[in-house]
Image (cartoon, rainbow, N blue to C red):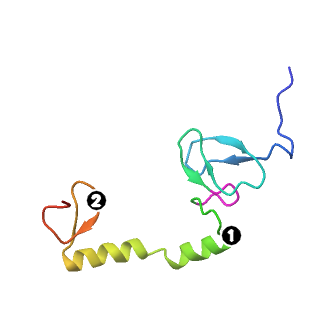
């Protein structure tokens, strides 16, 4: 029995960026895919988080420029003594969370 091998018309074999996940075939010209195993959305070209409509290089540059944004926000929350809502996790100045 012959094993199926993808042709160029079928697309490309991509590796899911989730460690230990798997591979699957992606049709050509697809900007964003969802892994059928772990459901992670990512770009099949660069393996980064999905960024439809944005070129891989532009997304990489944006991501690099904003790499510390989450850390800076957490530091701001600590300085201002903000807390996260226990129900939804959104930042809040209130002690009891969302309404």
Q: Where does the magenta region start and end?
A: 43-48
Q: On the rendered structure, is 58 left or right of 74?
A: right
> What's the residue at 66%, 47% (across, down)?
15
- The numbered disc on residue 89 is 2
Reading the chain from its start, which is encountered first: label 2 or label 1? 1
Give the label on residue 55, or none: 1
Residue drawn at x 49%, y 76% is 66
Residue 24, image x and y in percent?
69, 41
Q: Name the quadrant of the C terminus.
A: bottom left
**Residue located 21% across and 72% down the image:** 82
Between residues 46 and 11, which one lies in front from this camera angle? 11
In terms of image quadrants, where is residue 91? bottom left
- Name the residue nearer the viewer: 26 or 3: 26
From this view, report whether residue 18 is shown above or below residue 79: above
Q: Residue at x 67, y 72 (%)?
A: 57
Q: Which mark is residue 96?
A: none
């Amino acid at each position: 029995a012959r094993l199926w091998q993808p042709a160029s018309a079928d697309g490309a074999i991509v590796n899911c960026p989730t460690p230990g996940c798997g591979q699957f075939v992606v049709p050509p010209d697809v900007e964003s895919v969802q892994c059928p195993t772990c459901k992670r959305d990512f770009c099949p070209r660069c393996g980064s988080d999905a960024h439809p409509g944005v070129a891989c290089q532009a997304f990489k540059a944006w991501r690099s420029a904003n790499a510390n944004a989450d850390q800076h926000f957490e530091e701001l929350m600590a300085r201002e003594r903000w807390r996260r809502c226990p129900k939804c996790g959104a930042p809040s100045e209130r002690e009891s969370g969302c309404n």
